[in-house]
Each structure stands twice: as C-alpha cells, then as structure tokens.
Image: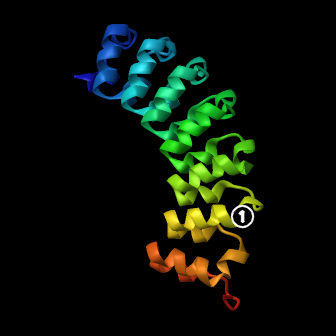
C-alpha cells in the first residue's frame, strides 16, 4: 500500500522501486520519500503524472525541468505555482497551464499578465483569471466581455467603467445572479 511509505523506515523511503510504487498509488506521497528521490526524474515524473501539485515537494532541479513541469501542469494548471521562475516565464509552459486552468495566470511571469493573447486564453478558460491582470487589461472591453461571458462573477475584477455599464452587468447576471452587488454605486449607463 503506497500510503505506508510515509511511516516506513528511512531505507524504504529512499528505495526507488518502493517510491515508484507509492507514486502510482498517489503522487502526493512524494513528500514522504527521501530528498534524493524527490530529485529523481522517474520518481517525480510518476508523481506529477498522477497529481500535478506534487511538484511542490520536488527538488528545485525538478521544478526547473521542463518535461516534469509540463507533465504536472497538464494534470493541474495550478501546479505552475511550484515551477521555477525560469519556467513560469516560459511561454509554452504558461500557455499550457492557463489553457488547463485560467486562474494559473496568477503564477505566470508578469509579462504574460499584460499580453492580450495570454490573458484572453486565460479568461476564456476561467473568467476569474481577470483578478490577476493589470488595470489596463481590466479596462479592455474584448477581454472583459469574454471574462464576464465565461464567468459572470468576473465582474468583481473589472474596472469601474464596466461595473457602470448596463450591458456588462446584465451579461454578468446571466451566469451570476449576484453580479448586481458588484455594479458601480453610480447610475448604470446604457
């Protein structure tokens, strides 16, 4: 049983075969094995294939290994949080992460939070991705429209200009009845 590896003696926690079997059971067991195996490509790859956020307990070298990180974010885009800074600034890695989970944009390098194509991809997947972009982007009508159509609750993150726009508020209410409470306190314009 893979769950027993956490309470196993140190020599078992440092055994590659035992670790691989444990990772097949549950990737998060990566935290219960030796530091040496948390730096082993095969073991970490097996762990993140089953549980992307197991990347959190991988070694720094593994967090900077593109194949490992791509496998992790393919399973869970939010695993981008645990990737190295270098890979959080890699356009291929970021694109895969936000295509899987739009809110992963918050873990991407700052440059991607202002690039129309990346933000649009993220908000099409999850309107809540708008929370982590610049004010300039929150004022882009095309991006805001996609975000609100995807997830009405995204109205919480748009500029006052759009919270004051009757069409935007109305569109947000289609998927999020509570959108009106985020509308501007000023008179809503047509």
Q: Position of residue 61 (x, y in %)?
A: 60, 17
Residue 105 image position (x, y, % from top left): 61, 47
* Colour scheme shown: rainbow
Q: Is residue 58 above or below residue 161?
A: above
Answer with left or right where residue 17 lies relative to residue 102: left
Instruction: Say if 42 sits above or below 183 in the image.
Output: above
Helix, strand, or loop for circle 1? loop
Image point (54%, 37%), residue name: 96
Q: Residue at x 60, y 77 (%)?
A: 168
List x then y, in percent, for residue 85. Answer: 68, 31
**Which residue is rendered at x = 52% and y = 14% of the image?**
39
Label 1 sits on residue? 140
Q: Nearer the viewer, residue 141 or 23?
A: 141
Quadrant including the N terminus: top left
Q: Is residue 185 above or below residue 138?
A: below
View extreme (right): residue: 136
Write the residue at 54% across / 49% down. 102
Any part of residue 182 in sight: no
Residue 166 sits in which quadrant?
Answer: bottom right
Viewport quadrant of the C terminus:
bottom right
User: Local crowd at mark 1 within 10 Å, few (<14), some, or many (≥20)?
Assistant: some
Q: Tell me: 112 left or right of 17.
A: right
Q: Position of residue 33 (x, y in %)?
A: 41, 18
Residue closer to the observer: 189 or 12:
189
Outermost residue, bottom direction? 187
């Amino acid at each position: 049983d893979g769950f027993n590896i956490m309470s196993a003696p140190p020599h078992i926690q440092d055994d590659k075969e035992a670790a691989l079997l444990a990772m097949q059971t549950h990737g998060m067991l990566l935290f219960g094995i030796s530091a040496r195996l948390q730096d082993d490509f095969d073991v970490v790859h097996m762990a993140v294939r089953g549980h992307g956020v197991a990347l959190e307990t991988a070694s720094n070298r593994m967090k900077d290994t593109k194949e490992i990180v791509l496998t992790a974010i393919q399973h869970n885009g939010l695993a981008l949080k645990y990737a190295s800074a270098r890979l959080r600034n890699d356009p291929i890695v970021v694109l895969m992460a936000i295509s899987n989970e739009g809110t992963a944009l918050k873990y991407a390098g700052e440059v991607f939070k202002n690039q129309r194509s990346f933000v649009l991809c993220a908000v099409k997947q999850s309107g809540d991705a708008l929370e982590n972009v610049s004010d300039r982007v929150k004022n882009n009508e095309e991006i805001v429209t996609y975000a609100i159509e995807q997830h009405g609750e995204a109205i919480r993150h748009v500029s006052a200009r759009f919270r004051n726009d009757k069409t935007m508020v109305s569109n947000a209410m289609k998927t999020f009845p509570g959108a009106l409470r985020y509308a501007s306190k000023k008179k809503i314009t047509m």
